[in-house]
Image: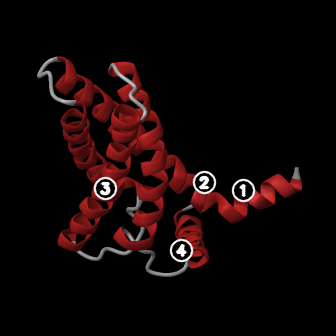
Amino acid sequence: MRLATALYRRFAWLIHELARFASVGAVAYVVQVAATNAFWAVLDAPPLVGQGLGTVLSVIVAFLGHRHWTFHQRARTGLHRESTLFFIMNGVGMLIQLLCVWVAVYVLGFEGQLATNIAGNVVGVGLGTLFRYWSYRRWVFPAAEGPEENAKNREKAETRRG
Protein backbone atom coordinates (compact mmCIF):
# COMPACT_ATOMS: atom_id res chain seq x y z
CA MET A 1 0.00 0.00 0.00
CA ARG A 2 2.89 2.35 0.69
CA LEU A 3 4.20 1.87 -2.81
CA ALA A 4 0.83 2.85 -4.29
CA THR A 5 0.64 5.91 -2.05
CA ALA A 6 4.21 6.91 -2.93
CA LEU A 7 3.53 6.48 -6.64
CA TYR A 8 0.35 8.52 -6.39
CA ARG A 9 2.12 11.33 -4.55
CA ARG A 10 4.93 11.32 -7.08
CA PHE A 11 2.63 11.39 -10.10
CA ALA A 12 -0.49 13.10 -8.73
CA TRP A 13 0.05 16.08 -11.02
CA LEU A 14 0.16 13.79 -14.07
CA ILE A 15 -2.84 11.73 -12.95
CA HIS A 16 -4.90 14.88 -12.46
CA GLU A 17 -3.76 16.37 -15.76
CA LEU A 18 -4.61 13.15 -17.60
CA ALA A 19 -8.03 13.07 -15.93
CA ARG A 20 -8.75 16.65 -17.05
CA PHE A 21 -7.42 15.85 -20.53
CA ALA A 22 -9.69 12.80 -20.72
CA SER A 23 -12.73 14.76 -19.50
CA VAL A 24 -12.28 17.51 -22.07
CA GLY A 25 -11.54 14.88 -24.68
CA ALA A 26 -14.73 13.00 -23.82
CA VAL A 27 -16.85 16.11 -24.32
CA ALA A 28 -15.06 16.93 -27.58
CA TYR A 29 -15.46 13.30 -28.67
CA VAL A 30 -19.23 13.41 -28.14
CA VAL A 31 -19.37 16.65 -30.16
CA GLN A 32 -17.24 15.08 -32.89
CA VAL A 33 -19.24 11.84 -33.17
CA ALA A 34 -22.60 13.63 -33.06
CA ALA A 35 -21.58 16.26 -35.60
CA THR A 36 -19.88 13.75 -37.92
CA ASN A 37 -22.92 11.48 -37.94
CA ALA A 38 -25.24 14.47 -38.44
CA PHE A 39 -23.18 15.59 -41.44
CA TRP A 40 -23.34 12.07 -42.87
CA ALA A 41 -27.01 11.38 -42.13
CA VAL A 42 -28.63 14.80 -42.48
CA LEU A 43 -26.46 16.44 -45.14
CA ASP A 44 -25.41 13.21 -46.89
CA ALA A 45 -21.78 14.38 -46.73
CA PRO A 46 -19.10 12.07 -48.13
CA PRO A 47 -17.17 10.07 -45.49
CA LEU A 48 -14.05 12.27 -45.45
CA VAL A 49 -16.00 15.56 -45.50
CA GLY A 50 -18.29 14.55 -42.64
CA GLN A 51 -15.35 13.30 -40.60
CA GLY A 52 -13.38 16.47 -41.27
CA LEU A 53 -16.20 18.88 -40.39
CA GLY A 54 -17.08 16.99 -37.21
CA THR A 55 -13.46 17.02 -36.16
CA VAL A 56 -13.14 20.78 -36.73
CA LEU A 57 -16.08 21.42 -34.38
CA SER A 58 -14.61 19.15 -31.72
CA VAL A 59 -11.23 20.89 -32.00
CA ILE A 60 -12.82 24.21 -31.06
CA VAL A 61 -14.44 22.64 -28.00
CA ALA A 62 -11.16 20.93 -27.06
CA PHE A 63 -9.09 24.11 -27.36
CA LEU A 64 -11.33 26.01 -24.98
CA GLY A 65 -11.38 23.16 -22.46
CA HIS A 66 -7.68 22.41 -22.58
CA ARG A 67 -6.54 26.03 -22.48
CA HIS A 68 -8.81 27.04 -19.62
CA TRP A 69 -8.91 23.83 -17.59
CA THR A 70 -6.57 20.96 -18.51
CA PHE A 71 -3.39 23.00 -18.93
CA HIS A 72 -4.42 26.15 -17.04
CA GLN A 73 -1.41 25.93 -14.69
CA ARG A 74 1.14 25.85 -17.49
CA ALA A 75 3.01 28.78 -18.99
CA ARG A 76 0.89 31.23 -20.97
CA THR A 77 2.67 31.91 -24.25
CA GLY A 78 -0.04 33.98 -25.89
CA LEU A 79 -3.45 33.19 -27.31
CA HIS A 80 -2.31 33.58 -30.92
CA ARG A 81 0.68 31.24 -30.52
CA GLU A 82 -1.26 28.66 -28.51
CA SER A 83 -4.28 28.62 -30.81
CA THR A 84 -2.11 28.44 -33.93
CA LEU A 85 -0.08 25.51 -32.60
CA PHE A 86 -3.21 23.85 -31.20
CA PHE A 87 -4.94 23.92 -34.57
CA ILE A 88 -1.80 22.75 -36.38
CA MET A 89 -1.42 19.80 -34.00
CA ASN A 90 -5.11 19.03 -34.37
CA GLY A 91 -4.67 19.21 -38.13
CA VAL A 92 -2.11 16.44 -37.80
CA GLY A 93 -4.51 14.56 -35.49
CA MET A 94 -7.31 15.02 -38.02
CA LEU A 95 -5.04 13.70 -40.79
CA ILE A 96 -4.45 10.61 -38.65
CA GLN A 97 -8.24 10.14 -38.37
CA LEU A 98 -8.82 10.77 -42.07
CA LEU A 99 -6.04 8.34 -42.96
CA CYS A 100 -7.77 5.67 -40.87
CA VAL A 101 -11.08 6.34 -42.69
CA TRP A 102 -9.32 6.37 -46.07
CA VAL A 103 -7.61 3.04 -45.39
CA ALA A 104 -10.84 1.44 -44.18
CA VAL A 105 -13.03 2.71 -47.04
CA TYR A 106 -10.73 2.96 -50.04
CA VAL A 107 -8.00 0.40 -49.32
CA LEU A 108 -9.79 -2.30 -47.33
CA GLY A 109 -13.14 -1.71 -49.05
CA PHE A 110 -15.25 -1.47 -45.89
CA GLU A 111 -18.62 0.14 -46.53
CA GLY A 112 -21.28 1.73 -44.39
CA GLN A 113 -21.54 4.04 -41.46
CA LEU A 114 -20.44 1.45 -38.88
CA ALA A 115 -17.14 0.84 -40.67
CA THR A 116 -16.41 4.55 -41.06
CA ASN A 117 -17.33 5.17 -37.42
CA ILE A 118 -14.97 2.44 -36.21
CA ALA A 119 -12.17 3.61 -38.49
CA GLY A 120 -12.50 7.33 -37.81
CA ASN A 121 -14.11 7.59 -34.40
CA VAL A 122 -12.44 4.69 -32.64
CA VAL A 123 -9.12 3.86 -34.29
CA GLY A 124 -8.45 7.33 -35.70
CA VAL A 125 -9.47 9.20 -32.57
CA GLY A 126 -7.44 6.82 -30.41
CA LEU A 127 -4.24 7.29 -32.41
CA GLY A 128 -4.90 11.00 -32.81
CA THR A 129 -5.45 11.40 -29.06
CA LEU A 130 -2.06 9.92 -28.24
CA PHE A 131 -0.42 12.36 -30.64
CA ARG A 132 -2.47 15.31 -29.38
CA TYR A 133 -1.68 14.81 -25.69
CA TRP A 134 2.02 14.53 -26.40
CA SER A 135 2.09 17.56 -28.71
CA TYR A 136 -0.01 19.77 -26.41
CA ARG A 137 2.33 19.17 -23.48
CA ARG A 138 5.43 19.53 -25.62
CA TRP A 139 4.63 22.55 -27.80
CA VAL A 140 1.21 24.12 -27.29
CA PHE A 141 1.06 24.48 -23.51
CA PRO A 142 4.70 24.07 -22.42
CA ALA A 143 5.66 23.84 -18.78
CA ALA A 144 7.23 26.97 -17.36
CA GLU A 145 9.48 24.61 -15.44
CA GLY A 146 9.98 20.86 -15.34
CA PRO A 147 7.06 18.64 -14.25
CA GLU A 148 8.52 18.06 -10.80
CA GLU A 149 8.95 21.79 -10.22
CA ASN A 150 5.39 22.46 -11.38
CA ALA A 151 4.12 19.75 -9.01
CA LYS A 152 6.14 21.17 -6.11
CA ASN A 153 4.89 24.69 -6.83
CA ARG A 154 1.28 23.47 -6.87
CA GLU A 155 1.84 21.55 -3.62
CA LYS A 156 3.33 24.66 -1.98
CA ALA A 157 0.40 26.78 -3.16
CA GLU A 158 -2.09 24.24 -1.84
CA THR A 159 -0.24 24.06 1.50
CA ARG A 160 -0.35 27.86 1.83
CA ARG A 161 -4.08 27.89 1.07
CA GLY A 162 -4.88 25.02 3.44
- Mark 4 belongs to which amino acid? Asn
Point 44% across, 29% down: residue: 118
Point 86% across, 57% down: residue: 3
**Residue 86's image quarter?**
bottom left
Q: Position of residue 137 (x, y in %)?
A: 45, 67
Query: How many other residues sit within 10 Å of disc 4, few (<14), some (14-19) or many (≥20)?
Result: some
Quadrant including the C terminus: bottom right
Query: How many other residues sit within 10 Å of disc 2, few (<14), some (14-19) or many (≥20)?
Result: few
Q: Are marks 4 and 3 in contact (CB under 8 Å)?
A: no
- Mark 3 belongs to which amino acid? Asn
Point 38% across, 62% down: residue: 72
Q: Position of residue 23 (x, y in %)?
A: 44, 41
Residue 15, disc: 2
- Mark 2 belongs to which amino acid? Ile
Task: Identify the element where label 1 is drawn.
Answer: helix
Q: Choose between 41 and 84: the one closer to the eye.
A: 41
Q: Which residue is mark 4?
A: 150
Q: Which residue is mark 1?
A: 8
Dot placed on the residue nearer the N-terminal end, 3 or 1: 1
Task: Identify the element where label 4 is drawn.
Answer: helix
Q: Nearer the viewer, mark 3 or mark 2?
A: 3
Q: Nearer the viewer, mark 2 or mark 4?
A: 2
Q: Position of residue 148 (x, y in %)?
A: 61, 75
Residue 90, disc: 3
Dot placed on the residue nearer the N-terminal end, 4 or 3: 3
The residues tagged by marks 4 and 3 sit, at their Cα atoms, a distance apart of 26 Å
Q: Choose between 106 and 51: the one closer to the eye.
A: 106
Q: How many discs appear? A: 4
- Mark 1 belongs to which amino acid? Tyr
